[in-house]
Image: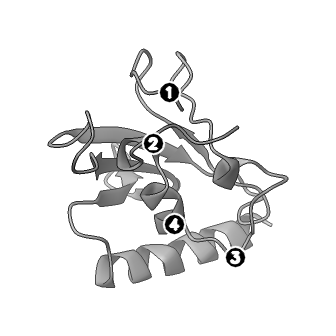
Amino acid sequence: MAGVARSRLAEERKNWRKDKPFGFHARPETLPDGSTNLMKWNCFIPGKPGTDWEGGFYPLSMEFTDDYPSKPPKCKFPAAFFHPNIYPSGTVCLSILNEVRRNPSDRAGCRLAASPPLRGRPAAV
């Protein structure tokens, strides 16, 4: 299954580079030897205009398992990042990231666009 996850992530990276939303940044982690780790992405997302997060640029990590895309990545902001949809640990509380309520056809970029600093109000739980 690891090959499926890596192939899917390589395809998503290629598509992301061609068609990413303005202001978003996401790339796989670069390892000390210069190679790319497709299983962990470092991202920055812009705050939504008209909200308290407007003008900000927020770091987010996405860690994928060998079960991706069947299982969603673990998405985390830095610990103690404040937002109503983010736990103190930095873990995101959104249904698109929930294994039961998500669709495996969702792309990583879709998850970034749904991240809390882009939302104007807390998501219903």
Q: Quadrant of residue 9?
A: bottom right
Image marks 2 and 3: residues in contact by CB distance under 8 Å: no
Q: Is residue 44 visible?
A: yes
What amino acid does circle 3 point to? Ser
Residue 84, which numbered label? 1
Which circle marks residue 116 in the picture?
2
Q: Amino acid at mark 2?
A: Pro
Sooner in the amino-acid sequence: mark 3 or mark 4: 3
> Disc 3 versus disc 4: distance between alpha carbons?
10 Å
Viewer-side label of 3, 1:
1
Q: Is residue 46 above or below residue 12?
A: above
Residue labelled with disc 4:
110
Could you say whether the residue bearing mark 2 is in a helix, strand or loop?
helix
Q: CA distance from mark 1 to mark 2?
A: 8 Å
Report how far apart the C-alphas of labels 3 and 1 lie in the structure. Answer: 27 Å
Residue at image location 74% in from the left, 48% down from the top: 98
Tag 1 near tag 2, CB within 8 Å: yes
Tell me the distance, in whole angstroms, between the alpha carbons under discs 4 and 1.
Answer: 20 Å
- Mark-to-mark CA distance, 2 and 3: 21 Å
Task: From this view, report whether residue 20 is shown above or below residue 41.
Answer: below
Identify the residue under disc 3: 105
